[in-house]
Image (cartoon, grey):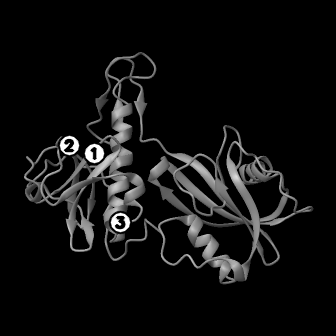
Amino acid sequence: MIQDISPHRFDRTFSREEAAAADIALCCRDDRILLRREGEGFALPRFADAGLTPAGRHVFSLDGVGCYLAAAPAEAPADCAYLTLQQVRQVRPMEVAFAAVVGVQLWRWYRDRAYCGRCGSPMEHSRTERAMVCPRCGLTEYPKLCPAVIVAVTDGDRLLLTRYAGRPYRGDALIAGFVEIGETVEDTVRREVMEEVGLRVKNLRYYKSQPWAFTDSLLMGYYCELDGDSAITLDTSELREGFWQKREEITPRGQDVSLTSEMVERFRLGKE
């Protein structure tokens, strides 16, 4: 998955250290991020590589090198390009894709927290932690994180697959949805399956979680079993298709960035 970057080290420790020429510049513009072409793949541009003045806000470190949200040039420097988040999903090596999308996540959050949501005053950066603080009313806000579920519904050797309606991603997916106020994660699993495909489920089994910066989410993956009738009643506002597929008919996923793909592949291999 996209966060599986070992032996590389991603360090979230808050720092006020100033940028240097050898540090990494995370330049975001219109939900795109600047990356440097390197061979057949991409690398994170350092200030010196891109001809940029070392300045910006430290957001994390990668392998001991500081990564800074920096002013984005209007035009991409030589050997660099602005990539969309959809393009970042295909970027390799994986540590570059992970750092890039987390950089965009934090850039969006800082951009959208310029003013206090309580009193409307300009917000200021905290001097002690990764947060925005209102100097007038004292409201403190932290980076946005939305809990959500990914659900693999099984029926013997069959897996329920879906395809989204009205989204750029057109491939096979699993049931997914955000946790609502006052709701347990397990209740979210049952509700989302019922809402999207009209099925009841039982024997919920937690698999693992994934930070999914593309949608500011923390994903929690569950396997569960069909409970009763397998006839699908599709919510066409969310999905354009929902269908059962036998284990042997599932296309191998290989290495992919998402929890969904890993869960589907584990089912295909009989390891769920």
Residue 137 placement, left or right of 187: left
Residue 147 placement, left or right of 83: right
Residue 218 horizontal/vertical position (percent) = 53, 53
Give the image quarter of residue 62: bottom left
Point 17% across, 45% down: residue: 75
- State if disc 2 and disc 1 touch (CB < 8 Å): yes
Q: Which mark is residue 72?
A: 2
The residue that mark 3 highlights is 91
Q: Provide the secondary structure element on which disc 1 rests.
A: strand
Mark 2 packing: few (<14 Cα in 10 Å), some, or many (20+)?
A: some
Q: Nearer the viewer, residue 264 or 98?
A: 264
Give the image quarter of residue 119: top left
Residue type at mark 2 is: Ala
Residue type at mark 3 is: Val
Mark 1 packing: few (<14 Cα in 10 Å), some, or many (20+)?
A: many
Among the two numbered marks 1 and 2 on one chain, the one whose residue lies closer to the N terminus: 1
